[in-house]
């Protein structure tokens, strides 16, 4: 099996390298036969990776300890599903997962959705350069070559530096097993989701690189890159939230985000990716921020490689990091090369990337996008500086200096409030011009709603000015969203408002899905603010039968128990929680002793409501029966998780295909037909907002409009 896996890895390396060369050369020379050979080589490469992936997965499930990887991360006591999850826990296994995901995405990008290019004038002209080409395919073919080049890099790293098929040096009867901290349901999906996000970010980078290299900067690449960028943003964001949930439930410290270097490694490209998505919109609709958008596409992909450097270099100490390895430095070199190439490309195409018009109003959407992009980049730079501070201080001063949460919060609070303000105002603004008279009225009304919410929060006992400001901004966002929908619905059908609202939501589904994502961000901000500013924590020494009153609850230690399981010992405290004299729930925090690794882990118990979480931790016990417990109250935690779910739901609504074929897939035939008829496609710089519809005839022409 190992020999088969190694042969498949070698096949993938050779096949992806040839595919990269053939696709790039064939696209440059417009040689169909060469491109076809590259496509076949890519398919063989991905097939080889699939077999190698299956071989390692099967070895983990069957506990085949002749594999060094299996001996290091699995054991006979480990359940099969945690044995399978070990595939993405180790260094070489996670690289194999990343490469396989990238290969699968590259194949999907190349062959789906399938669009038919123009037909060659002669049946025997397959080996000739194409006389004409579909704009989609003239970008997709070389971009596919870029994807295969990166796949070749990943497989080369595995073959020469981190072989997942390496043999055990000696006969092993049982493996070392998986770290107890990683035996958690969130870890079954958190790493694959993060690596899928990294793989997805490769596609916008490839399209941007091809667009700059080929001078195809008219906007075709934007239409192809936006859905991939939005998918990557949502997937990586979901992975970050899953990691936060794992930290919240498994590490037992009462929090979910500690500004750990590896946490920051995933968070930084998510921030720049958020800026990239808005930059793409500003380019498409406002014809501005072109250099910034190209730079963000390169930077986001480069920062995904930087995150890999953080986990694999051994420079940074983290629970999530791997051991010291030269692999991380390979990714750092790649990141530096990408940064240099990106700067050179921007200098080369600076005239072509000049903005086509100036911003006409500070209350236009492109002005808000510019402000949001600057805020996101400032936050990303702060996270990057804090992450590098330890390593750089040790290098320069000879001693490591670690920055705490106060360093990050000093920037996060003002920048976060700025981002929330731009997010709240966006629905009532337009591209290319200032708000209309009706929109100005709604802006004033929404601001009043925000002021009322701030006053209500203050009267309800909220004293922290940051919490009061977040409450006001959340109300402003909800009112602005409602105002935008009502304005567009009224103008769509002034007589039958309900019918107009239905038509508005159908016609502008993609635009309003973006606003739903904004509302999800507001919910997440409410949860983060509440859990950060309102957190309470207190430790107790309790005996069986003792009751303490804390945070409006009565907490009784009913009894303590000990259980022996096949792979661990469990010491548990049974807590009965009541409020106002009525039983509320029973919580069982525990300490687990894992026999194989001979270490203790903390298993917290959480009672969650819309008001907040009661988070209970069992630390230790004494011979006389006293237990050391800590109780933590984290307000509004459900709002945080709900905000993430709303953002993912909004992304799905935005990406869901419409009734008509998208311009990406079917636009080639349409464009070709227009060229044959002597017509040219007019590309509007401003998306037709529903609020601009003046008459019933105009309304009927935009029934299936996609925004």
Image (tube, grey):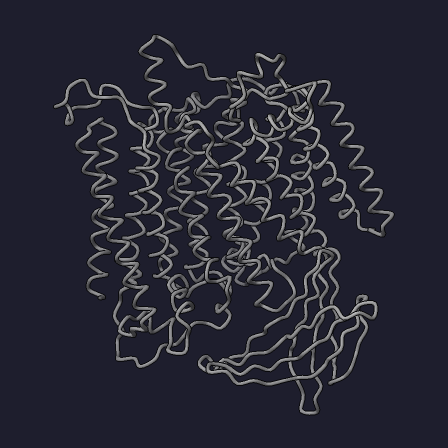
State how many labels appear.
Answer: 0
What's the residue at 22%, 56% (across, down)?
8
699 horizontally vs 13: left or right: right
Q: Quadrant of the N terminus?
A: bottom left
Residue at point 38%, 65% (across, down): 84
Whole-percent x, y for residue 699 in the image: 58, 17
Quarter of the image holding residue 64?
bottom left
Please tell me which residue is depicted at 24% across the width and 56% down the height of the picture. 9
Q: Position of residue 556 (x, y in %)?
A: 76, 77
Whether residue 562 sits left or right of residue 330 in the image: it is right
Residue situated in front as seen by the camera: 312 or 141 = 141
- Residue 329 in the image, given as x and y percentages of width and height: 38, 54
* The quadrant where residue 548 appears: bottom right
Residue, far left? 124
Answer left or right for 161 relative to 127: right
> Given the current orientation, which residue lies at the most extreme bottom position?
624
| Residue 580 spot, x, y in % from top left | 83, 67
Q: Residue at x 66, y 73 (%)?
A: 617
Residue 183 higher or lower than 626, as above or below: above
Q: Residue furthest top?
A: 678
Tell me if residue 703 comes above or below residue 2 in the rendering. Answer: above
Residue in the foreground of this view, choosing between 595 and 646: 646
């Amino acid at each position: 099996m190992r020999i088969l896996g190694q042969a498949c890895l070698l096949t993938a390396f050779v096949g992806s390298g040839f595919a990269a060369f053939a696709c790039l050369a064939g696209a440059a020379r417009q040689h169909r036969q060469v491109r076809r050979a590259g496509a076949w080589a890519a398919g063989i490469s991905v097939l080889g990776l699939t077999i190698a992936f299956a071989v390692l997965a099967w070895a983990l499930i069957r506990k085949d300890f002749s594999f060094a990887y299996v001996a290091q991360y699995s054991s006979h006591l480990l359940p099969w599903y945690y044995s399978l999850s070990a595939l993405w826990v180790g260094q070489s296994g996670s690289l194999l997962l990343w490469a396989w995901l990238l290969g699968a995405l590259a194949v999907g990008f190349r062959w789906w959705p399938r669009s038919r290019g123009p037909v060659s004038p002669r049946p025997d002209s397959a080996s000739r350069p194409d006389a004409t080409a579909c704009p989609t395919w003239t970008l997709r073919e070389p971009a596919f070559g870029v994807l295969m080049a990166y796949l070749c890099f990943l497989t080369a790293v595995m073959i020469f530096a981190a072989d997942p098929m390496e043999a055990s040096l000696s006969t092993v009867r049982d493996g070392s097993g998986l770290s107890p901290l990683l035996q958690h349901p969130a870890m079954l999906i958190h790493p694959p989701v993060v690596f899928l996000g990294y793989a997805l970010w490769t596609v916008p980078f490839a399209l941007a690189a091809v667009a700059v290299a080929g001078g195809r900067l008219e906007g075709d690449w934007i239409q192809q890159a936006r859905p991939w960028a939005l998918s990557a943003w949502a997937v990586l964001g979901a992975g970050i939230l899953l990691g936060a949930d794992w930290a919240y439930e498994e590490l037992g410290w009462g929090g979910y985000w500690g500004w750990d270097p590896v946490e920051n490694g995933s968070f930084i490209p998510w921030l720049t990716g958020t800026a990239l998505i808005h930059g793409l919109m500003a380019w498409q609709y406002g014809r501005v921020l072109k250099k910034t958008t190209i730079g963000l596409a390169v930077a986001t992909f480069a920062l995904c490689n930087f995150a890999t450097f953080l986990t694999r270099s051994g420079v940074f100490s983290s629970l999530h990091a791997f051991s010291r390895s030269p692999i991380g430095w390979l990714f750092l070199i790649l990141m530096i090369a990408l940064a240099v190439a990106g700067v050179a490309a921007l200098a080369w195409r600076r005239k072509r990337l000049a903005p086509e018009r100036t911003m006409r109003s500070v209350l236009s959407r492109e002005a808000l996008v510019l402000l949001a992009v600057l805020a996101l980049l400032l936050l990303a730079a702060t996270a990057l500086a804090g992450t590098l501070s330890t390593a750089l201080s040790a290098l320069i001063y000879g001693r490591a200096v670690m920055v705490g949460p106060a360093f990050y919060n000093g920037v996060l609070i003002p920048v976060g409030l700025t981002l929330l303000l731009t997010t709240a105002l966006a629905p009532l603004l337009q591209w290319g011009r200032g708000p209309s008279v009706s929109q100005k009225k709604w802006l004033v009304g929404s601001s009043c709603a925000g002021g009322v919410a701030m006053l209500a929060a203050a009267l309800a006992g909220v004293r922290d000015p940051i919490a009061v400001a977040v409450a006001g901004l959340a109300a402003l966002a909800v009112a602005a969203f409602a105002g935008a929908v009502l304005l567009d619905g009224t103008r769509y059908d002034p007589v039958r408002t309900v019918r107009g609202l239905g038509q508005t939501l159908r016609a502008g589904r993609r635009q309003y899905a973006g606003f739903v994502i904004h509302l999800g961000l507001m919910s997440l901000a409410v949860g983060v603010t509440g859990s950060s500013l309102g957190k309470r924590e207190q430790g107790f020494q309790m005996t069986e039968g003792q009751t303490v009153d804390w945070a409006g609850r009565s907490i009784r230690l009913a009894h303590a128990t000990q259980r022996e399981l096949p792979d661990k010992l469990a010491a548990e405290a049974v807590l009965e929680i009541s409020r106002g004299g009525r039983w509320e729930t029973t919580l069982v925090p525990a300490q687990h002793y894992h026999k194989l690794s001979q270490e203790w882990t903390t298993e917290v118990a959480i009672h969650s409501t819309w008001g907040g979480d009661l988070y209970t931790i069992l630390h230790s016990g004494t011979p006389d029966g006293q237990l050391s417990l800590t109780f933590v109250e984290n307000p509004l935690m459900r709002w945080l998780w709900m905000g993430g779910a709303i953002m993912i739901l909004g992304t799905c609504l935005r990406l869901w295909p419409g009734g008509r074929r998208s311009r990406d897939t079917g636009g080639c035939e349409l464009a070709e037909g227009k060229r044959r008829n002597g017509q040219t496609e007019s590309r509007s710089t401003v998306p037709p907002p529903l609020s601009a519809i003046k008459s019933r005839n105009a309304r009927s022409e935009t029934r299936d409009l996609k925004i």
